Amino acid sequence: MAATSVERENMSSSAGLFWSTAKEEGDLVHKSGYADDSTATADDIDGGFSSLDGMLQWAIGHSDPAKLKEKARDVNRLSPSELRQRQLEIKELMEELKMPSDAQLMQIALDDLSNSSLALEDRHRALEELLILVEPIDNANDMCKLGGFGVIIRELDHSDSDVRKFSAWILGKASQNNPYVQKQVLELGGLATLMKMVNSSSADEATKAFYAVSALIRNNAVGQQLFFAEAGDKMLQDILSSPSMDIRLRRKAVFLVGDLAECQLEDTDKAEMPFLSNRLLLKSVVDLTASGDLDLQEKALVAIKNLLLLKTTEAMVFEEFCGLGEALERMKKQLEDSMLEEDHREYVIDIENLLKEVELTFQAKLENVGVVPT
């Protein structure tokens, strides 16, 4: 394995990446002469030119005209077979200087991760590369074809917390609004492992795992079935009802509840999930309106609005068990105090408008069961 201190910058479409160090430098720049030159820089390798035309213009501008004429005469004296041989040599050189594609870079990183003797620093670097590379949907789909998500799912069991965190992050980013990737990751059993990671003592690891879980089940009926089969409802309830839980995790959890309710509203032919009308869940969401975190409050209001619109949720549960009316009044006063802070004013106004929408939705739900709002 190559020395771990050597970093090679990739100038592919995913700019700023570093090729994993488990590959020999010669695997990326073959026979070009640069690999053996310790003084060559990244600019020496690609010439710093955006195109071959640019390279040609630079070469002409920095050449001796007399020598160029002499070279031209030499070329004219070549036989057809010698000329073809020279053209072949130039073509081979250009191929050797060509930068690897994103798919090739992903394969290199995956090969590194499959190397059990890979240094931890290089394992981190390979995962960081993949995190950037899988963001475009076409690259994520290519990862499927390369069998890469099986490799990443295996990394979820690694002893290093950062390896697990980055692996979960990659799965979440690649699965976002991508049914093709969602299907493969679900079939490989990634969801169950990620849900266990949500209980990690590392807040960063738990947050990235929850992000991946959400990405896998969003707009995915199979993923949602597996989620609830793995006691996903209990997981959400535990996060929402625990004030000591990391605030990032609570934001993601209430956002997921609102998203699941919205999906339910969009698919009217599908029976509503009993979990979404569970009074303990509803109370946990309503209680979040008392948080001092504006982002959490906003996400809670969105979730409440969607939950109110479901047919299976009961107005009187919101009124009597959850105390929604009182919670909204308290939140109004809290937002009035927040308006005094100039930095938050515009954001607070947006939340106030959302609160008014929730109030109107709540009042309409109460009126539907013959209760006159006070």
Image: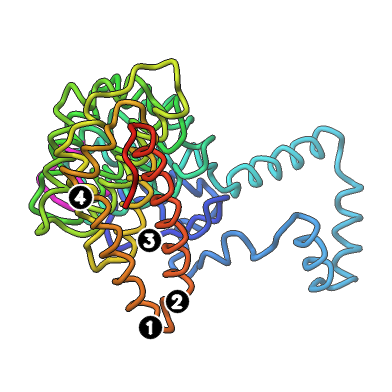
For badge 3, the amino acid type reads Glu
Q: Which residue corresponds to mark 1? A: 341
Q: How many marks?
A: 4
Say which element carries label 1: loop
Q: Nearer the viewer, residue 79 or 256?
A: 256
Q: Which residue corresponds to mark 3? A: 7
In contact (CB < 8 Å): disc 1 and disc 2: yes
What is the quadrant of residue 148 in the picture?
A: top left
Q: Is the residue marked by circle 4 packed among few (<14), some (14-19), or many (20+) residues within 10 Å?
A: some
Q: Nearer the viewer, residue 93 or 236?
A: 236
Q: Which residue corresponds to mark 2? A: 345
For badge 4, the amino acid type reads Gly
Between the C-alphas of marks 3 and 1, the distance is: 47 Å
Q: Nearer the viewer, residue 26 or 132?
A: 132
Q: Is residue 118 visible?
A: yes
Say which element carries label 4: loop
For badge 1, the amino acid type reads Glu
Q: Nearer the viewer, residue 3 or 259?
A: 259
Q: Is residue 87 magenta?
A: no
Between the C-alphas of marks 2 and 3, the distance is: 46 Å
